[in-house]
Amino acid sequence: MQEKKQKKSLIKQNILQYIDFMNITRYEFYKKTGITRGILDQNNGMSEENTARFLACFPEINSEWLLKGEGEMLKSNIPIAKHTEDGSGIPLIPISAMAGAFTDDLNVLEYECDRYVVPVFKGADFLIAVKGDSMYPKYSSGDIVACKKLPLDTFFQWNKVYVLDTDQGPLIKRVQEGKYKDSIAIVSDNDKYRPFELYRKQIYNIALVLGVIRLE
């Protein structure tokens, strides 16, 4: 009888997801953590010692997410450096100009936007401010979220928060499985706002919210 192949542990899967989002190479990961090279490629669990090393090197990680897959990947209120003057860093764009962030519009990204260096968000493509209270208490109006562009045909991770450029305007909402074949459910954390269905053909661009940050 053929032996059943053991799958990677949830912790290893989440570590791989994290370093992919943050554009951290495996070489950089092993060098920074001191974890033995090749551990992430093995189909087994992650020792408590190596898990502790990972969390010590990347304190921005939400441990509940790492260990159980619950909540957001990163902790809230992560501090960032002050804005840069040399054109480096991640652009903070007005929500009204969000479409430009997806198309790399030079007028939006180079001339009209402040830029910030965010050490823990190497994979972020742009920053955007939350407007309104529809996502309260998760996000308050004025909070800054870091976003990573995704392909239009991306497979949504249900119950995660996304920034969506749609025919109804820009949305920062939680996404859940829709009632229909080609739709998704758009959900607010504030129960004053009712969920609604949005068809994929109504979505022009997609970005995953990596986490919330604080400007110094």
Image: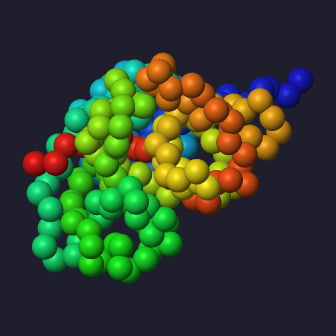
Residue for point 58% across, 51% down: 168
Q: Looking at the image, is 138 positioned above or below residue 171?
A: above
Q: Position of residue 44 (x, y in %)?
A: 57, 29
Residue for point 79% across, 43% down: 182
Q: Looking at the image, is 184 positioned above or below residue 107?
A: above
Q: Position of residue 206 (x, y in %)?
A: 56, 54
Q: Position of residue 130 (x, y in %)?
A: 34, 43
Q: Position of residue 21 (x, y in %)?
A: 45, 50
Q: Nearer the viewer, residue 31 or 204?
A: 204
The N terminus appears in which quarter of the rendering? top right
The scheme the figure's colours follow is: rainbow
Residue 81 can be seen in this image: yes
Q: Is residue 166 left or right of residue 46?
A: right
Residue for point 16% across, 48% down: 215
Q: Is residue 141 left or right of residue 187?
A: left
Q: Nearer the viewer, residue 26 or 206?
A: 206
Q: Looking at the image, is 79 positioned above or below residue 83?
A: above
Residue for point 68% across, 42% down: 198
Q: Nearer the viewer, residue 209 or 35?
A: 209
Please count the marks in the image.
0
Q: Nearer the viewer, residue 26 or 120?
A: 120
Residue 30 can be seen in this image: no
